[in-house]
C-alpha cells in the first residue's frame, strides 16, 4: 500500500472516530436546544404524510410560521362550508400545532373547534349521522380535550391551557357534557391561577381563576368543608367579590354544613 493511500485511510478513520465521539454530544445539545425552544421539534411521520412535498420542504427549511398560517386559513375554509368539514379542520389544525407547538393560539383554536363548535353542532343539528349524534358529541368533546392537554404539555407556563381544559370539563351544556368533572377542573383552575402570566396587570386573571377553583370545590360534597372558609374569605375581601354565584354557593354551603345562623356571613 502506498504512503499516500495510507494517509487517506488514516484521515478517513480519523473522521469516522471524530463523528462517533461527537454524535452523543451533538444529540444531547440538540435535545437541550429543543427543550429551550432554540430549535424546533422534528416533524413526526404522521404529519409528514398529511403535508404536500412542497409544504413539508418549506417547513423543514425554516418557514414553519408561514406554513402554519396557511393551514389555519385552510381550516377556516372547511369551517365555513355547509356542513363544516370537522375531520379536515381537525387535520389542518393538527399540522399547525405540530409546526408551531409553542404558539398557544393553534392549540386554543384546535381545541375550540372540536370541543365547542363540533360538539355543539352535533348537539343542535345532528349532521348526517342520524341516531349517532350523542356519540359524535362525546367524540369531539373528548378529542378537543385531548388536544388541550397536549397543548398544556407544550406550554405548561401559560394559564390559558389549564383554564380552557377546566372550562370544557365544567361545560354547563348537559347534551355535550352530561357528567361535569368538578374535581379535575378545580385542580386545573388552581394551576392556572398560579401561572406567572395570570398574575400580570391589568387584568390579573389569577383572582378569577382562584374563584373558579373554589366554585368547583364548593360543588363537591367531600370538599365542601375545605372550600367554605376559603370562599368566605374571598367573599369578605372586598365588594368586588360580592357576586351572585358566590352568594348562592355560600348560602348552600352554610346550610349543608349547618353553620349556626349568627355565624353565617350572609346574616351579618
Image: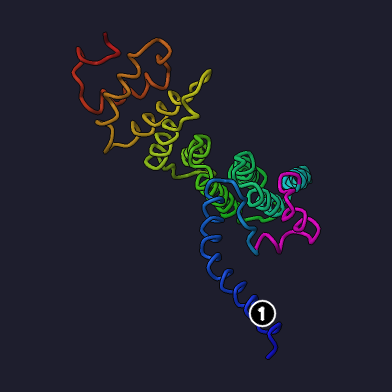
Q: Quadrant of the C terminus?
A: top left
Name the residue rendered at 53%, 42% in the picture: 155
Say which residue label 1 marks. Answer: 7
* Res. 263 visible in picture: yes
* Residue stretch in magenta: 46-66
The residue depicted at 29 percent of the width and 36 percent of the height is 221
- Is residue 47 a member of the stretch shown in magenta? yes
Q: How many marks?
A: 1
**Point 64% across, 75% down: residue:** 11
Quarter that holds the N terminus: bottom right
Q: Is residue 242 above or below residue 127?
A: above
Figure check: 74 above or below 170: below
Instruction: Tell which residue pokes out farthest to the right in this image.
Output: 54
Locate residue 185 relative to residue 110 in the image: left or right: left
Residue that appears at 56% across and 52% down: 143
The residue nearer to you, when weighing 231 against 2, is 2
Amino acid at each position: 500500500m502506498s504512503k499516500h493511500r495510507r494517509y487517506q485511510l488514516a484521515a478517513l478513520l480519523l473522521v469516522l472516530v471524530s463523528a462517533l465521539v461527537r454524535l452523543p454530544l451533538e444529540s444531547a445539545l440538540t435535545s437541550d436546544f429543543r427543550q429551550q425552544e432554540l430549535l424546533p421539534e422534528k416533524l413526526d411521520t404522521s404529519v409528514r404524510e398529511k403535508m404536500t412535498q412542497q409544504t413539508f420542504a418549506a417547513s423543514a427549511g425554516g418557514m414553519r410560521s408561514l406554513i402554519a398560517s396557511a393551514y389555519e386559513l385552510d381550516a377556516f375554509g372547511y369551517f365555513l362550508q355547509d356542513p363544516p368539514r370537522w375531520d379536515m379542520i381537525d387535520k389542518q389544525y393538527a399540522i399547525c400545532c405540530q409546526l408551531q407547538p409553542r404558539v398557544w393560539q393553534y392549540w386554543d383554536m384546535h381545541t375550540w373547534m372540536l370541543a365547542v363548535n363540533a360538539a355543539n353542532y352535533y348537539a343542535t343539528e345532528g349532521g348526517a349521522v342520524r341516531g349517532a349524534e350523542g356519540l359524535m358529541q362525546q367524540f369531539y368533546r373528548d378529542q378537543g380535550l385531548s388536544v388541550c392537554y397536549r397543548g398544556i404539555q407544550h406550554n405548561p407556563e401559560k394559564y390559558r391551557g389549564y383554564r380552557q381544559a377546566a372550562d370544557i370539563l365544567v361545560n354547563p351544556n348537559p347534551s355535550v357534557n352530561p357528567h361535569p368533572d368538578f374535581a379535575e377542573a378545580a385542580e386545573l383552575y388552581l394551576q392556572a391561577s398560579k401561572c406567572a402570566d395570570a398574575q400580570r396587570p391589568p387584568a390579573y386573571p389569577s383572582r378569577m381563576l382562584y374563584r373558579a377553583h373554589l366554585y368547583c370545590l364548593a360543588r363537591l360534597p367531600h370538599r365542601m368543608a375545605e372550600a367554605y372558609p376559603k370562599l368566605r374569605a374571598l367573599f369578605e375581601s372586598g365588594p368586588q367579590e360580592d357576586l351572585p354565584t358566590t352568594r348562592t354557593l355560600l348560602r348552600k354551603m352554610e346550610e349543608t354544613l349547618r353553620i349556626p345562623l349568627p355565624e353565617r356571613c350572609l346574616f351579618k
